Amino acid sequence: MSLKIMEKRPIYDYSPTERNKALLSLGLPDFIEKELDKWFFRKKDLDQSKWTKISKEHKLLLNNNFDFNLPKVVWQGLSSDGTRKFLIGLEDGNSVEAVAIPAKDRLTLCISSQVGCAIGCTFCHTGTQGLTRNLKVYEIVGQFLAVSQWLIQNVSKESRLTNIVFMGQGEPLHNFKNVKQAVELFVSQTGIALSKTKITLSTSGLVPQIEKWEEFPDINVAISLHAVRDDLRSQLMPINKRHDLKRLFDALKNIPLRTSRRITYEYLLIANLNDQEQDIEGLCELLPRKQSKINLIPFNEYPGSDYKRPSNEQVLWFQNELHKRGYTCTIRVTKGDDILAACGQLKTEFEKVNIWDGQRVSPKVIETNHYE
Ligand code: SAH
Ligand code: SF4
């Protein structure tokens, strides 16, 4: 019974079908899978002493063949607006950030898909780091589970993350296979069982991957547009040199939209660069009114950034002009910028910490000005 039969892999790296096969191959009875789902995904409790329906022998077999570790919350900070930023420590000493953003009727977790990012947008703090590596499936799912667990243990037993946005560090479609498998687990009824409508993936516009979108579970898509002219978009987002606006919009036709759903276009507003009348006209030419939602993001400044945020009046004017032209257009309220948790500010501001060798080291905070 105590045999190690398979190569030991993180259990959260298995798809539901793969895991089912693996459990069968270990000769474990059917109810074990349901018990694991209950403890992992519904109760989010990994204290095995509570798994009383699973015998000691079966636990031994499970522990010999699966790795149950989750990435760990090594630091968290609470912003004055209720946004909570988590630093998640990974096995190799790298870390990524996840941000829990409360709203009236939901608690959204903004998660990372990579350590750093290769796309190198000139306005993005994360982009300045370059890419270190893709996150594994269990590290993506693990952000959700680790933060859920932390909230249950430290805030309230009733705490529940309701939505997920892939808007943390990294370009999710650059890590297509792992992000796709993680999303499958997020929406699976035997997994985390979130509705597909509660998950949004934001992409800078990787055309070859958008062309394969039908392989993905049918979640919401947000496109980081930011400019309506190729020259300006290429200046802001080097990816536009390879996949320009024409190629991007041709590829977007592959995204099947259900009647009630639209593509969201994120539009960063940078003072005197893309916040003028001509940009509004350009947006109207590019975006079909009925199938588009525009989300304006006033640029979040960070230490060393070259661009400036427009005035609030300018942002409201821009929104109003789009409303007048019949567009649904919202302004993203900046959340958590006092702890550098807002969009584009996510860059690991901490020394690398290795918490996997049994040592829990407090990360050194280099640059935050308000945290718990
Ligand atoms: N890589 C993906 C998802 C992560 S970025 C993408 O680019 O879409 C999430 C959002 O934050 C994107 O729309 C991105 O353009 C925006 N963003 C990046 N830097 C920003 C900044 N400094 N201020 C405001 N938004 C920013
Ligand atoms: Fe990467 Fe998105 Fe930042 Fe661009 S905006 S560098 S794609 S994380």
Image (spheres, rainbow, N blue to C red):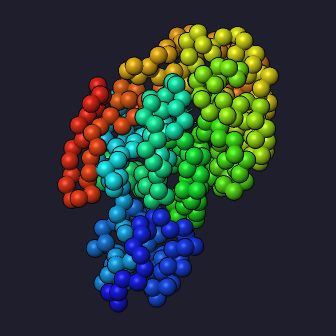
| Residue at x 35% of width, y 86% of height | 3
For the C terminus, the image quarter is top left
| In the rendered image, the vertical position of residue 126 relative to residue 211, given as above or below | above
Residue 362 visible in the displayed image: yes
User: In this image, 211 relative to 234: left or right?
Assistant: right
For the N terminus, the image quarter is bottom left
What is the quadrant of residue 71 in the picture?
Answer: bottom left
| Residue at x 29% of width, y 43% of height | 352
The image position of residue 259, as x and y in percent, is 78, 45
| In the rendered image, the vertical position of residue 181 relative to residue 94, given as above or below | below
| Residue at x 49% of width, y 14% of height | 308
Count of picture labels: 0
The image position of residue 337, as x and y in percent, is 40, 26
Residue 157 visible in the displayed image: no
The image position of residue 225, as x and y in percent, is 65, 29
User: In this image, 330 relative to 31: left or right?
Assistant: right
Q: Nearer the viewer, residue 66 or 98?
A: 66
User: In this image, 217 relative to 149: left or right?
Assistant: right
| Residue at x 43% of width, y 79% of height | 6
The image position of residue 147, as x and y in percent, is 38, 50
Q: Nearer the viewer, residue 310 or 312?
A: 310
Furthest residue toward front: 242
